[in-house]
Image (cartoon, rainbow, N blue to C red):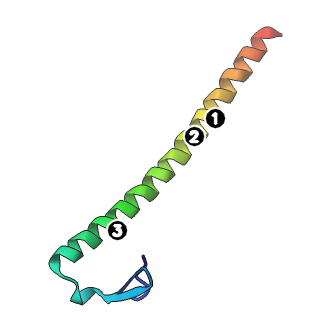
């Protein structure tokens, strides 16, 4: 799915004029676009959380290794 031009929606190689969609179809499109944004934000947050977890794990490992010496 893409909106190559501002008023054209492309789904499955078919082009649709957004102005010609029904109100229900416009709501569905808005839902899909909003969910795309939420998925991107969730992936971004997961990347941050993963890096933070790795950092804490490395700090823990370093702390444990320093006590062994």
Indicate the quadrant containing the N terminus: top left, top right, bottom left or bottom right: bottom left
6 w.r.t. 32: above or below: below
**Cα–Cα span, label 3 and label 2:** 26 Å
Q: Where is residue 49 in the image (x, y as percent from the top left)?
A: 53, 40
Q: In this view, does 51 lie above or below 9?
A: above
As rendered, which of 66 and 27 lies closer to the eye? Answer: 27
State if disc 2 and disc 3 touch (CB < 8 Å): no
To which residue does mark 1 refer? 54
Q: Where is residue 24 in the image (x, y as percent from the top left)?
A: 17, 74
Residue sitting at the far left = 23
Horizontal relation, residue 51 to residue 15: left or right: right
Marks 3/1 in contact by CB < 8 Å: the verdict is no
User: Height in image: 40 above or below 56?
Assistant: below
Q: Which of marks 3 and 2 is nearer the N terminus?
A: 3
Tell me the quarter of the picture where residue 48 sits.
Answer: top right
Which residue is drawn at the image coordinates 58% and 37% (left, top)? 52
Q: Which is in the foreground here, disc 3 or disc 1?
A: 3
What residue lies at 83% left-to-right and 10% top-to-bottom?
A: 69
- Mark 1: few, some, or many residues within 10 Å (few <14, many ≥20)? few
Residue 7 appearing in the image:
no
Mark 2 touches mark 1? (CB < 8 Å): yes
Q: Quadrant of residue 32?
A: bottom left
């Amino acid at each position: 799915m893409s909106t190559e031009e501002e008023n054209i929606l492309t789904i499955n190689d078919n082009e649709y004029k957004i102005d010609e969609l029904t109100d229900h179809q416009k709501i569905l499109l808005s839902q899909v676009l909003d969910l795309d944004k939420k998925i991107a934000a969730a992936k971004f947050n997961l990347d941050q959380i993963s890096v933070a977890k790795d950092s804490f794990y490395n700090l823990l490992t370093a702390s444990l290794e320093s006590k062994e010496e």
